[in-house]
Image (cartoon, grey):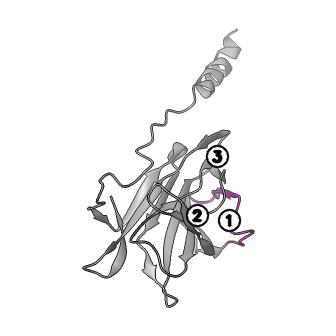
Amino acid sequence: MRRYAPLSLLLILAACGEAYDPPPLYQATSADCGTLLDADTFPLPRGITVSATNPIPTPDGGIDIGVNYLLPRTTQLQFATDGFPLTLPKGAVVEKAEVVSVYQRPTNQRAEIVEIVNGVPLALMSVGTADHTQFRYRLHFKGKLPPRFDLVTPDVKIGQKRYESRVFTYRWVEQTKSYSMCR
């Protein structure tokens, strides 16, 4: 019996799972989305995070937005939904992002480009040689955009459980003549 006690304790702890209480999924907390942000990070289970940056204008009149996933060593994430749609606030899809590039960068190594298959790699896996692995997506949206919009990041599977992810909110700022992330 004594020799099975450590194994029993390990199985009980594994069955408990981890507690995950996400912050609000929708970034905008006010009707006017008045607080401007440079970037925002959303925590997922197992220490994984997703963050987004402010839009950068492009020569074609569109914008590029960076979305980063940071995975601690020995973690992986699967996308449960397809793509990165830009929508009206809590509304209809305006445009789906073109994934221009995906870079993988372990914290102790140089960035490497990841091959893009059908727009989005289906799974992200951390490398075992670094404390964290960053996956940086560069998303492109073409043409005229609405004065306020949401960037919906894909739902994810971590382990065998599905989680909704952050909806980042942006609005046109007349003073700077550019889009900014807002809350």
* Separation (CA) of disc 1 from disc 3: 15 Å
- Residue 110 falls left or right of residue 78: left
SS at mark 3?
Answer: strand
Q: Which residue is mark 1?
A: 120
Label disc, if present, on residue 157 of the rendered structure: 3
Q: Quadrant of residue 118?
A: bottom right
- Judged from the image, the secondary structure of the residue bearing numbered disc 1 is loop
Residues at circles 1 and 2 in contact by the CB criterion of under 8 Å: yes
Q: Residue furthest bottom?
A: 59
**Disc with the residue nearer the chain's start (3 vs 2):** 2
**Residue 31 position within the rendered picture, expressed as x and y whole percent measured from the top left:** 30, 55
In the image, taking residue 32 as reference, residue 68 lies left or right, namely right
- Give whichever of discs 1 and 3 has the lower sequence position: 1
Residue 153 to residue 14: above or below: below
Q: Mark 2: few, some, or many residues within 10 Å (few <14, many ≥20)?
A: many
| Magenta stretch bounds | 114-130
